[in-house]
C-alpha cells in the first residue's frame, strides 16, 4: 500500500547513500540535524540555547581585549604583519572603509591596504572570499591567450610622447616663464620591439576593462565588471597617467587628463591613507607634470599636498596614517596611535619634490623632520628599523621584529633614493642606508637548501624566520641602483643573487607566478627550496620583481633579465587576464588549472608592473635615464636635482 511518509523517508535516505550531490548532501545533513534536535528533551534544548546566547555575549564583551591583543598587528603594503611570527592563515583580507559621500558602492579595501582591527578584517575576509567569483571554465572568463598575439600587433598606437629633461624644468622660474615641453630626441626610439608591443597590448586590454566598468573609480573588478572604491579619487586612472605617456597612449592619456581636470575632486569628505595617497596620487601627478610640463597637474598636486599636511600635526611630528582631505583633520587608525615606519618614511621624495616645484618650503620641512627624528632614534638593530612608531611619543613601538617586507620595505628604498634625489649631499641618509644594508647582510641573509638560493628572512625577537615577502624583491633593484651611483660593488653581487631568487619565486611555481610570501627551506634533507603556506598563495599583480629586473638589465645589459620578465608577462597573460577586459589578482598560484581570480585589478598593475616591463624590454637606456631620474615606490618618475 502507498505510504507517503514511508516513501519520503526511503527516498531521502537512499538518495544520500547512492550518488549524493553537493545540494542533496546539504539537505540530508539539515534533515539529520533537525531529527537529532527533535529527539532532545526540552531541558537539553534549553541548555544548548542558553549556552549559545552566553557565548555570543562573551564574544561581544571580549571586543576591547581582542583589540588590545591585536594592537601589535597592522597592515602595510597589503600584508598582515604580526609582531609574533605565526600569522594566522587567511587573516590578511578585506575590510570596509568609511564610505565616501554618495558612493554608489560600499567601499572595501583588499588585503593590500588594510584598515580597521585585524579581527574585523578576518571576518570580512571570509565573507569576501565567499563572494569571490571563481573561474567559470565554460564561460572562460579568465582568458588564456597564446604567447604571441601576432594578430593584434597592427593595432598598436605608435605615438611617442614628449618629455622634459630634469634640467629643463627650472623651478626658479615663475610658471609663465617655464620652458614649453620639448621633444626629447633620446625618447624617439627607432621602433618598439615585439615585447614592448606586447606590454602596450596588455595595457590596452587592462585599460579597456577599466574604462568600460570602472571609469573614474579607484579599481576595476574585472570579473564582476564593476569597480571598488578606496578613497574615491580615481586611483587607477591617476596611477596610470605616466605609464600612458611612456607607452605612447595619447588618446587614452588625453581622456584621462580631462577627467583629472574636471572630475578629480580633492576636497571630498573622505579619509585617505597618507602614504598610499602620497605615493600613488601625489606621486602620479608630480610625475606626469615632470614629463609633460602641464601646469594643471602641478596645481592638482599642490592642492593635494596642502590637503595632506594636517597629518603632520601630531605631538611628535611623526604623521598620522589617515587624513580627511575635505575636512582637514587627521587621525591614527582606530585601534592604535602608532604609524607604520615604512609609511612615514616613504612620502619624502614626493613632498620634497613638491617643495622644489612650488617653492613652498613647508612640505619638505615636514618630511625632513621625520627623517631627522628617525635618524637619531634608538631601537634599531644594526640599522634595521622596527615596523611601528608611536605618533605621540615619537618612539619605535613593538620592538624586536625586523623585516625588509611589509611595513619596513620602502624605508630602506627611500633612504637611498632621497640621497640620490638631493644630489648625493645628505650624508645622514647615505649613512643610514649603508648601515642598514650591513644589518641586512649580518642578520637577515641566508642560503636555502638544496639549491643555495640567497634570500632575505626576518628576525623576530632574536629568532630567525626564513620567510620572505614578494615585496622584498624591490631590494635587488635598489641595491643595484646604489651600486650604479657609486656605492660598494658587493651590493651589486648581492643584488644579482637576490634577483635570481626572486625569479625562482616565479619559476618554481605551477603558474609561473610568485605567491605573496614564500618560506625557504634550510634543511639539507629536504628537496625543495621554496615552500608556500596555504594562506600565502595569492598573487596581486605586484611589480617588485619586474621592477628589479628592469634595474638589473639597465646596469648589466644581461638579456637574461629581459627573458625572465618576458616569461612573467606571458604568465600574467595566461593566468590573470580577463577576457572582457582587465587583469585580476588570483588566489592560488599553485593551481594552474584554476588559479581562482580575486576579481581585483590593483592600480599598481598599470602604474608599476606594466611600466617596468615596458622599460625592461626597451634597449634605449636613455628612456627615463637612471642618471637623470629616480622612481618613487609606485614607479612615478622624479628628476634627480641638479642644483
Ligand atoms: C605599491 O603600492 C608600492 O610599490 C608599495 O611600495 C608596495 N606595495 C605596492 C606594490 O606591491
Image: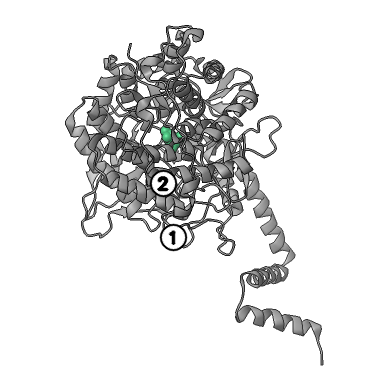
- The local crowd at label 1, few if under 14, some if 14 to 19, many if 20 or more residues have their Cα within 10 Å, is some
Residue located beneath label 2 in the image: 516
- From mark 2 to mark 1, how far is it between C-alphas? 16 Å
Vertical position of residue 278 compared to residue 511: above or below: above
- Asked whether 501 or 485 is in front, the reply is 485
Q: Earlier in the sequence, mark 2 or mark 1?
A: 2
Quarter the C terminus occupies: top left
- From this viewpoint, is residue 473 visible? no
Colour setting? one colour
Check contact, mark 2 vs mark 1: CB within 8 A: no
Q: Position of residue 303 (x, y in %)?
A: 56, 17
Q: Quadrant of residue 106?
A: top right
The label number, if any, that marks residue 355 in the structure image = none
> Which quarter of the figure is the N terminus placed in?
bottom right
- Within 10 Å of disc 2 (Cα), the crowding (few <14, some 14-19, many 20+) is many
Q: Which residue is denoted by mark 1 in the rendering?
A: 592
At numbered mark 1, what does the secondary structure look like: helix, strand or loop?
loop
Amino acid at each position: 500500500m502507498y505510504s507517503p511518509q514511508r516513501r519520503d523517508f526511503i527516498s531521502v535516505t537512499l538518495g544520500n547513500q547512492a550518488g549524493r550531490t553537493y545540494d542533496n548532501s546539504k539537505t540530508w545533513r539539515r534533515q539529520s540535524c533537525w531529527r537529532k534536535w527533535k529527539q532532545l528533551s526540552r531541558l537539553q534544548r534549553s541548555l544548548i540555547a542558553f549556552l549559545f546566547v552566553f557565548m555570543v555575549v562573551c564574544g561581544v564583551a571580549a571586543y576591547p581585549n581582542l583589540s588590545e591583543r591585536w594592537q601589535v598587528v597592522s597592515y602595510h603594503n597589503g600584508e598582515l604583519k604580526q609582531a609574533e611570527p605565526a600569522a594566522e592563515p587567511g587573516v590578511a583580507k578585506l575590510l570596509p572603509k568609511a564610505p565616501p559621500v554618495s558612493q554608489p558602492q560600499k567601499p572595501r579595501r583588499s588585503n593590500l591596504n588594510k584598515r580597521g582591527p585585524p579581527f574585523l578584517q578576518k571576518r570580512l575576509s571570509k565573507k569576501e572570499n565567499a563572494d569571490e567569483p571563481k573561474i567559470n571554465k565554460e564561460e572562460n572568463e579568465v582568458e588564456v591567450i597564446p604567447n604571441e598575439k601576432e594578430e593584434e600587433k597592427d593595432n598598436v598606437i605608435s605615438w611617442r610622447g614628449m618629455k622634459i629633461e630634469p634640467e629643463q624644468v627650472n623651478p626658479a622660474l615663475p610658471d609663465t616663464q617655464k620652458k614649453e615641453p620639448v621633444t626629447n630626441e633620446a625618447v624617439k626610439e627607432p621602433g618598439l620591439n615585439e615585447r614592448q608591443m606586447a606590454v602596450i597590448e596588455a595595457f590596452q586590454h587592462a585599460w579597456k576593462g577599466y574604462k568600460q566598468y570602472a571609469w573614474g573609480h579607484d579599481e576595476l573588478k574585472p570579473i564582476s565588471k564593476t569597480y571598488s572604491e578606496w578613497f574615491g579619487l580615481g586611483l587607477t586612472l591617476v596611477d596610470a597617467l605616466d605609464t600612458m605617456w611612456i607607452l605612447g597612449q595619447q588618446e587614452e592619456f588625453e581622456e584621462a587628463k580631462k577627467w583629472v581636470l574636471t572630475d578629480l575632486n580633492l576636497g571630498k569628505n573622505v579619509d585617505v591613507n597618507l602614504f598610499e595617497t602620497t605615493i600613488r596620487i601625489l606621486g602620479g601627478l608630480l610625475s606626469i607634470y615632470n614629463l609633460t610640463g602641464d601646469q594643471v597637474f602641478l596645481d592638482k598636486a599642490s592642492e593635494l599636498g596642502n590637503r595632506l599636511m594636517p597629518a603632520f600635526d601630531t605631538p611628535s611630528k611623526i604623521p598620522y596614517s589617515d587624513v580627511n582631505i575635505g575636512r582637514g583633520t587627521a587621525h591614527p587608525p582606530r585601534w592604535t596611535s602608532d604609524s607604520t615606519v615604512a609609511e612615514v618614511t616613504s612620502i619624502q621624495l614626493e613632498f620634497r619634490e613638491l617643495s622644489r616645484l612650488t617653492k613652498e618650503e613647508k612640505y619638505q620641512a615636514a618630511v625632513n623632520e621625520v627623517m631627522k627624528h628617525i635618524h637619531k632614534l634608538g631601537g634599531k638593530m644594526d640599522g634595521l628599523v622596527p615596523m611601528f612608531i608611536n605618533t605621540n611619543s615619537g618612539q619605535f613601538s613593538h620592538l624586536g621584529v625586523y623585516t625588509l617586507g611589509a611595513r619596513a620595505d620602502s624605508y630602506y628604498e627611500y633612504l637611498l633614493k632621497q640621497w640620490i634625489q638631493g644630489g648625493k649631499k645628505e650624508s645622514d641618509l647615505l649613512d643610514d642606508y649603508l648601515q642598514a644594508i650591513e644589518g641586512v647582510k649580518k642578520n637577515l641573509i641566508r642560503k636555502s637548501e638544496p639549491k643555495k638560493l640567497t634570500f632575505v628572512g626576518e628576525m623576530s625577537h632574536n629568532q630567525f624566520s626564513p620567510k620572505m615577502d614578494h615585496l622584498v624583491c624591490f631590494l635587488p633593484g635598489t641595491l643595484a641602483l646604489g651600486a650604479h651611483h657609486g656605492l660598494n660593488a658587493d651590493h651589486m653581487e648581492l643584488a644579482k643573487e637576490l634577483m635570481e631568487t626572486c625569479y625562482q619565486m616565479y619559476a618554481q611555481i605551477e603558474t609561473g607566478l610568485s605567491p605573496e610570501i614564500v618560506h625557504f627551506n634550510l634543511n639539507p634533507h629536504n628537496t625543495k627550496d621554496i615552500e608556500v603556506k596555504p594562506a600565502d598563495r595569492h598573487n596581486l599583480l605586484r611589480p617588485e620583481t619586474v621592477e628589479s629586473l628592469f634595474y638589473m638589465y639597465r646596469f648589466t645589459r644581461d638579456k637574461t633579465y629581459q627573458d625572465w620578465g618576458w616569461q612573467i608577462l606571458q604568465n600574467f597573460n595566461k593566468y590573470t587576464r580577463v577576457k572582457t577586459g582587465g587583469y585580476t589578482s588570483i588566489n592560488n598560484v599553485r593551481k594552474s588549472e584554476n588559479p581562482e581570480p580575486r576579481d581585483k585589478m590593483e592600480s599598481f598593475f598599470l602604474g608599476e608592473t606594466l611600466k617596468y616591463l615596458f622599460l625592461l624590454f626597451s634597449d634605449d637606456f636613455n628612456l627615463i635615464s637612471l642618471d637623470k631620474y629616480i622612481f618613487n615606490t609606485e614607479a612615478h618618475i622624479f628628476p634627480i636635482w641638479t642644483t
